[in-house]
Amino acid sequence: MKPAAIGIRAHSGWVAAVAVAGTLAAPQILARERIVVIDGDGPRANQPYHFAKNLSLREAELHLAQCAKTSRRLAATGLESIAESLHKARYAIVACGILTASGRPVPALPEILASHAMIHTAEGEFFRDAFADACERLKIPITRVRERELLDRAVSELRIGAPKLRVQLTDAGRGVGPPWTQDQKNAALVGWLLLESAGKPHR
């Protein structure tokens, strides 16, 4: 089995997931998916904390628990489908990179609901956590990488200058066609970054 990695970039209610193999210099894009992790429309599902703000604390807890259950189930189904396809092609997923925002810790629910900024932070973590949970179920090692640090880290660890790296990322998507936006580029980049790390000998 050849090694592969998955990169995840989350949005409200869905993620861009890209499975890669090879290197950025010799890229292989094995899968590119938009995985939806909500089962309804509107803020009740895709902005669960915004919706919960108008509920009692107990109702908010129940609402978020139900949303989490749904999102984790759909995330696991989406990742499992990718994993099965890769397995048939003789690839084994050795890592999953989940891109994060600021990395601020999420406080208790009452504090979250009292702050609009923290509601946004919590919702970002909510959908990322759904995929972290899915990876744990599938026994895929997880690494969280701050997106604002991704480019600098890739330049350092992949030993490619930033201008060339951007060109190679753009070129890597030509074979798969659109969409190949920053979502897919960064998801792919964190995948190749983890493959580079996985290939280094441990000291």
Image (spheres, helix red, strand yellow):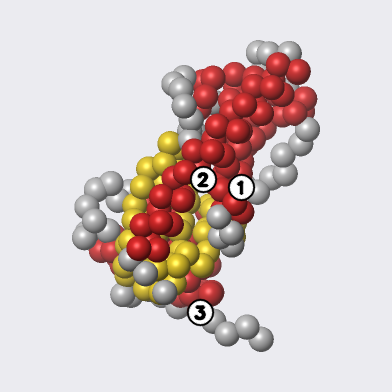
Kind of residue at badge 3:
Gly
Q: Is residue 186 above or below residue 34?
A: below
Cβ–Cβ under 8 Å for marks 1 and 2: yes
- Whether residue 107 appears in this view of the structure is yes
Horizontal side of 182 relative to 190 (left or right) equals left
Say which of 34 and 185 sits in front: 34
Report the residue marked by disc 3: 199
Local crowd size for mark 3, using a 10 Å CA cut-off: few (<14), some (14–19), many (≥20): few
Name the image quarter holding the C terminus: bottom right
| Residue 34 drawn at (x, y percent) | 37, 43
Q: Residues within 10 Å of mark 2 (few under 14, many from 20)?
A: many
Distance (Cα) linking label 1 and label 2: 8 Å
Q: Give whichever of discs 1 and 2 has the lower sequence position.
A: 2
- Distance between mark 3 and mark 1 Cα atoms: 25 Å
Q: Residues within 10 Å of mark 1 (few under 14, many from 20)?
A: some
**Helix, strand or loop for disc 2:** helix
Q: Reading the chain from its start, which is encountered first: label 3 or label 2?
A: 2
User: Which mark lies nearer to you, 3 or 2?
Assistant: 2
Total of numbered circles in the picture? Answer: 3
Residue ID for mark 1:
133
Residue beneath label 2, please? 76
Name the residue type under label 1. Asp
Say the numbered circle drawn on residue 167.
none
Find residue 64 and report its horizontal and vertical position in percent: 65, 27
**Front of the two marks 3 and 1:** 1
Q: List x then y, in percent, for residue 119.
A: 64, 29
State the residue at coordinates (78%, 33%).
Answer: 108
In this view, the residue in front, 51 or 2, is 2
- Quarter of the picture containing the N terminus is bottom left
Q: Which numbered disc flags the more N-terminal residue, 3 or 1? A: 1
